[in-house]
Amino acid sequence: MGLEDRVAAASKLEEVYRARGDWSSCIRTLRRAASLVPDTERVDWLSRAALIEVDARHDRGAAKEIYDQILTLQPDHGAALRFQAEWLTSAEGPQSLESFERLESFMADRDDLDDFDVRLEVSSFYSKLAQAYLEAGRGDDAVPRFERALELNPAHLHSLQSVAPLYFERKDWKNAQKVLRQILQLTGGQGEPAQVAQTYTELGMVERGLGHQDKAQKRFTKALEIVPNHVGALKGMALILEDRQDWTTLLNVYNNIIFHAPVEADVLAAYLIKGRILDEKLNRHDKAASHYEGGLAIKPNQPRVVLRLAELALRRGDWQDALAQADRGLALEIDNRDRADLLVVRATAHAAQGESDAASTAFAEARAADSAVASLASVDDHEVVREFVAARLQANP
């Protein structure tokens, strides 16, 4: 039997199997015939097999395999591309970015967007593509895809929730405000409390970025009503209070952060900021020192915090403590700048106690570590040295 006869026989068998509803035999016949014909004809046989997998057998995995084969033969095959897009947007879990990128131009050229279901499908595709870019660390590529998803479906909650932090990172406060308000409108401010409180917190940060202090405080307060001691809202409220120089209330807020924050970095930051406020704004130097020590108890290797303790010792003329703090800092893992600053403190403490040789050695080492120390002529004037160290701390907390 020649090739033409075999193909004709396959066509007859296809008709018989379709009439019987014997889909497995029908697909087997179609795939066998596809292997016999040239590439230009093979796509037609495979397309019929794929449609049976989808419409009659409801086996989308098998259909995908056939459509993958079709696309190797005809990369612009509309039905195969449409199926691949539907597959990607409906599949659970992360999908290949390359697969999405291959389909983007096809989805962008869809001319049936007047159909409501198609708009939802294409919106979902762009949202998934944006998510794939995010997972690849390509936030700048993700943003316009999330925006396209929202053009097609302004109520697409996942896209709204995903693009909001990207606007936030860019300090694109206007767009962030629009998106966060849309989330609250869609959810009615209801849902899982932690998520709702987080949305209000983010909106508070956006309002602060726009210079709307009262609105920002209102948003943080709302978040704290939903989840008392929500750490993000407490941190936002602290920024407002610092802007307003309400130091007493600010300290209470940081106390709550220290007590409730589950993340060590937040507790550490709260200790150090409290120390700075107590020292620089309220002149409560002993309390400041205890908070610096609290921060060091959490993370000992912080030479700049040790330098703050050393500067406090210089300020009160406690040369032994200044020397002890300098040695403490120099024993840590430090860079040249930190080393130079701590050596300046050591040199000053030695000089104040009449230990000129030790002072000269430490001062020479400081100058060798960082050329900026050359602005100090000597370490004999304790107040000049203290102001130098304080300025260095201010420039690099």
Image: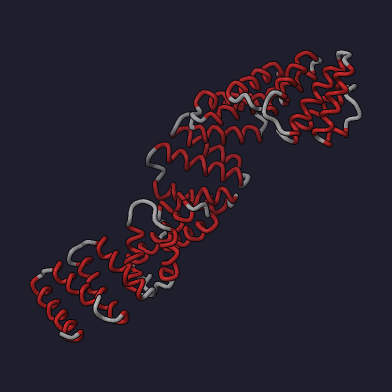
Q: Going by the picture, which residue comes out furthest to the front?
A: 1
Up/down of 211 relative to 35, above or below: above
What residue do we see at 21% from left, 77% from top? 33
Give residue 196's quadrant in the image.
top left
Q: Position of residue 302 (x, y in %)?
A: 66, 27
Count of labels in the image: 0
Give residue 352's quadrant in the image.
top right
Q: Where is residue 27 in the image (x, y as percent from the top left)?
A: 18, 70
Q: In which quadrant will I find the C terminus?
A: top right
Give residue 283's quadrant in the image.
top right
Q: In this view, does 294 lie to the left or right of 285?
A: left
Q: Going by the picture, which residue comes out furthest to the left?
A: 20
Up/down of 335 relative to 24, above or below: above
What residue do we see at 52% from left, 44% from top? 203
Q: In which quadrant will I find the N terminus?
A: bottom left
Q: What colouring style does the render use?
A: secondary structure
Q: In this view, does 161 lie to the left or right of 112?
A: right
Q: Where is residue 84 in the image (x, y as percent from the top left)?
A: 34, 65
What residue do we see at 45% from left, 55% from top? 132
Please indicate, yes or no, whether residue 89 appears anywhere in the rendered image. Answer: yes
Please indicate, yes or no, whether residue 249 appears anywhere in the rendered image. Answer: no
Up/down of 22 relative to 159, above or below: below
Q: Where is residue 289 in the image (x, y as percent from the top left)?
A: 68, 19
Q: Is residue 49 left or right of residue 383?
A: left
Of 334 and 261, the residue lying toward us: 334
